[in-house]
Every structure is written in structure tokens, then in C-alpha cells.
Image (tube, rainbow, N blue to C red):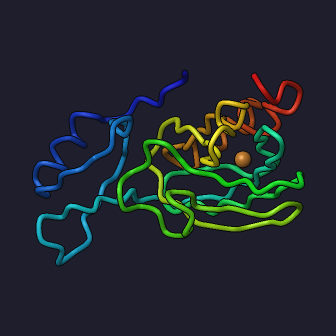
Amino acid sequence: MRRLTLGTAALAAAALLAGCTGVPDGAAEAQALVCPPGEPGCDEILPIGPGGAVEVEMGNFFFNVTDGIAITGEIEVTAVNVSDAYHNIEFLGAADGTYLGGSDGEAVVGADGFETDVGQVALFPGEWLMICNVPGHRAAGMELPITVYATEEEAELAIEAGETDVDRDREMPNT
Ligand SMILES: [Cu+2]
């Protein structure tokens, strides 16, 4: 698993100064944190960044990122269902309270057969796991890690190196 290395100590200090709690596991690399102003205790901590957009194909039983790149912040997720069965996308380990869309449990997008849904999710930099939370679907192969870059520069370097998530899973969708 590739990890971005950033100023972890400075971030922890910033979080302490702000009195924030609830930084999710796996978000130690988070470059910027904010507590919504006026919120007692600042218990909702959101990543700050330019965001991004990814397009994900979902089918029986796989995910494949077909386009886009995820940068920390608010990320638009377009889920294209290429099968005849309902599927959705949940990001395991994402920050509590960062789900900006989705009514299907913790999923941020969900679509019936051959339909498309668009949702938003706020994610810290790092590697997160996308799953379909329909019972049995994750075990059947519907899980895929997705990289959230800390900055646009990090994302551009990955694009130049051909190391993004796009089409990584196409040849072996269940591995
Ligand atoms: Cu599914």
C-alpha cells in the first residue's frame, strides 16, 4: 500500500489546538483539517482540498475506475452500473459525518441495473477501500482501494507516471 508522507506532527498539533476529535483511522496524512465554525467541540472534522471526480463502473461483482482522479476534499463520484442488478459504493473508514449524499446506509451512490448515480464524499488523503454494501457483494469481489491525493501536484505526478487507479482493475476484476 502506497502512503503519502506529509507533516503528520504538525497536523496532530493543529488538531489539538482546534480542540477537534474524531480524526478517522488512516487519516494521519491529512494535510489540512477544519472544524466547522461555531460547532461546539468541533466534532465534525472535514478535509480541505480542491476535491476531484472519479467515474467508477460497477457490475457483477467488480468495480473499475474508468476516469478521473481523487484529491482530498469533496470528491464527486459517478457510479455507472453496467450490470442488471443494484449496486452501490461505500467508502470504508472515511471520516464520520463526511457523507454528503446517499440514503442507502453509508453508501454515497447507488444505482439499479444499467443506471448511473452521482454523489459526493469528503475524503482525507490516503488510501480508502470502496465496497458495495449489498450483502454478499463485497465478498464476491466488489471491493477496490482508491487513492486520494493530498494535492493537485501529487495527482499530476501520478498521472504522469501512469500510476492512477484508472483501469487498474479491468483485467482482473475480482483480484
Ligand atoms: Cu453490489
Q: Residue at x 84, y 24 (%)?
A: 172
Answer above or below: position of 43 versus 5. Answer: below
Quadrant of the image occupied by residue 161:
top right
Residue 59: x and y in percent read 83, 46
Residue 23: x and y in percent read 28, 47
Residue 147: x and y in percent read 59, 38
Q: Residue at x 56, y 57 (%)?
A: 107
Counting every numbered tag in the picture gives 0
Is residue 86 rendered to the left or right of residue 9? right
Question: In the rendered image, which quarter contains the N terminus?
Answer: top right
Is residue 145 rendered to the left or right of residue 35? right
Question: In the rendered image, which quarter contains the C terminus?
Answer: top right
Quadrant of the image occupied by residue 6:
top left
Residue 130: x and y in percent read 60, 42
Q: Residue at x 78, y 31 (%)?
A: 168
Q: Residue at x 41, y 61 (%)?
A: 98
